[in-house]
Each structure stands twice: as C-alpha cells, then as structure tokens.
Image (cartoon, rainbow, N blue to C red):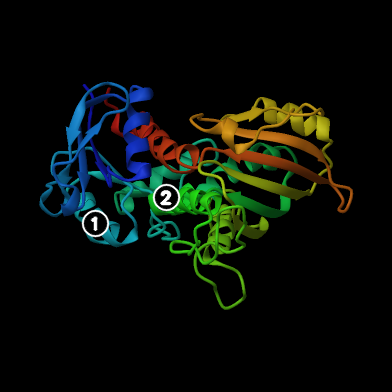
Amino acid sequence: MGYRVVVVGATGNVGREMLAILAEREFPMDEVAAVASPRSTGTEIELGDTGKMLKCQNIEHFDFTGWDIALFAAGSGPTAEYAPKAAAAGCVVIDNSSLYRMDPDVPLIVPEVNPEAIDGYTKKNIIANPNCSTAQMVVALKPLHDAAKIKRVIVSTYQSVSGAGKAGMDELFEQSRAIFVGDQVEPKKFTKQIAFNVIPHIDVFLDDGSTKEEWKMVAETKKILDPKVKVQATCVRVPVFVGHSEALNIELENEISAEQAQNILREAPGVMLIDKREDGGYVTPIECVGDYATFISRVREDSTVENGLALWCVSDNLRKGAALNAVQIAELLGRRHLKKG
C-alpha cells in the first residue's frame, strides 16, 4: 500500500523536479496529483520519465481530504493560503517556501543532518524545507561539526539563476543571446545585467546591510545544525543556469587536519568527496546537475584561524536544494511516522 501524494506548483522548475525525483526514487505512491494555479489548469506534465502524464488541477478547487502528503513548491503567497487547509484536512505539508522555516512549531529538516526533528511535525502538520544554499551547506558541515564542533562559518555563495525560477533562467539566456548579436540588454528579473557578470545581491536588503538570503543562511543553519554556530554569509548570483557553489571557511573548537576532514567527509551521508590536488580534480556546477549528492572539493587547512578548514561545496540547487530534499523528507516521514508502502 502506497501514499497518495500531491505536488503543488507542479508546473514550476521545482515542482517538475519533484515529480521527476518521486519517479526516480520509486517513492511508494498509489496516486499522485499535479496541482497548480488556475492558469495552468489542464496543462499536462510527465511523471518523470515514466511516460505517465498528469493533468494539472486547479489549486482553488482541490480537496486535500484523503491525501497523505503534499509537496508545496508554489511560493509563500499560495502556501500561506492553501498549506493550512491541506494540513487541517490531515495531509502532511512539506513546504519549499520560506514561509514556515523559522516557525518554532514547524520542523526545518535536512534528513542527513537533523532527522529526529521531524517528530515535531504534528504541531501543525507542516514540515519546512530549507533555503537551497543552506541545505547543501549543512550537509557539508554536519559531519565536521560532529567530529570537532564548529564555532564559526564564513560562506560566500555563487548561486545559479535557476534559484530565481524560470524567469531567471530565461533572462540569462536572452541577455547572453542579445550580447552576441549586439542588441541592448535590459535587466528585468535581476537588478543588474546577469550575463557575463556577477551580482552580490539576492533577495531584499535588511537594515544591517545584509540581504534576506544571507539572513536565511544564518538563521536556518542555527535552527538545523546548532544555535551556537556563528555564520557570516555573502550571497552572489552568477551566470550559471543550474547548480549552486559555496566557498566555506570553518573555525572549529578542536583541531582537525585536512586529511582527517577528507576521511570524515568521504564517509558522510549525502556527500561525494572529489578532491584531487591537480588540474580538474574538483567539481563545478555543470558537473553536479542532475545528481543527488552534495559535492565537496578543495579541502585544506585555513592558517588564519586556530583549527580552521576551507572547502568548496557544489550541489544541484533544484535537487538537493529543493526537490530532492523535500522527497527525502517524505521518505523520512514515511519511515518514522506514516508507515505505508
């Protein structure tokens, strides 16, 4: 016996990826529904590569009664309206938006890092998926934190345009083409030209000069990993279609060598260590697309602080940063609580 699963926001980048991953991982489903906004009603979407087509249903008329799990990839606005309705109908919501992440009654889960926190989902029948850049970072940090206790993290991100949705990907493509043919480039989705450029600005600015994306990385890491860990983030949008990269500088309480860190990371769940100290002996965003792992390279000691490490971390943001993590949460929920399939 399998689950009845709803994917809300099924026509978007993350929603489509959720459907693909449900199929790839052979998630035990008796039935799956694709749900989206009224303008997408009737649109047909394939369930991964199964050949099975799903016809999108209108979120405004969808009844969540009798459904087990709803994966929300619809943004904070629709989630605020429909997630509580789904939860009240007995359907467990796994939400990819930022709406519930810092709610003390909603667990914020990365299954490789804090699986036990999922037990608190019954307070609201809602589970939050973290920010894409936070998700891959904490997968990298968790094994090192367990081994030597992390005190402080400085992270600079290199985030792909797919983190801004289809509009972000379209803008990079259109601007690149315009530059090659000599047409004028006008930013629409981003604040400045993204093609052949980098923009040190993701989400809105806060009073202290940081952006909301940077604040998310700080607050979410504390909630998922350890409230005592200090985090400083600089988040940058780069002209890459898919795949977020991060440069991490980590200060630990206890001494750990680069070789020890490599050995720990090599065995860590969700991590793929590719760290050859030679030309090309590291992973770039293009190589991580379509993969489940969080890739780690360039592990070395940071001599500027006592007990310091530096590393490079890359992951497919549409997968581990969003859709894969949500499906992994659903799998964890099934193992620990729902027990079907």
Circle 2 packing at 10 Å, graded few (<14), some (14-19), many (20+), is some
Residue occupying image coordinates x 74% and y 29%: 280
| The one of 303 and 167 positioned closer to us in this rendering | 167
* Observer able to see residue 183: yes
Residue 242 in the image: state x and y as whole percent. 51, 41
The N terminus - image quarter: top left
Residue position for label 2: 170
Tell me if 336 is positioned left or right of 163 in this view. left
Q: Between marks 2 and 1, how big is the CA–CA gap?
A: 32 Å
Closer to the chain start, of discs 2 and 1, is 1
Residue position for label 1: 84
Residue occupying image coordinates x 61% and y 57%: 236
* Observer able to see residue 131: no
Instruction: Name the kind of residue labelled 1 in the image.
Output: Pro
Instruction: Name the kind of residue labelled 2 in the image.
Output: Asp
| The one of 135 and 307 positioned closer to us in this rendering | 135
Q: Is residue 269 above or below residue 304?
A: above
Residue 46 in the image: state x and y as whole percent. 25, 30
Among the 4 quarters of the image, the one containing residue 18: top left
| The one of 287 and 197 positioned closer to us in this rendering | 197
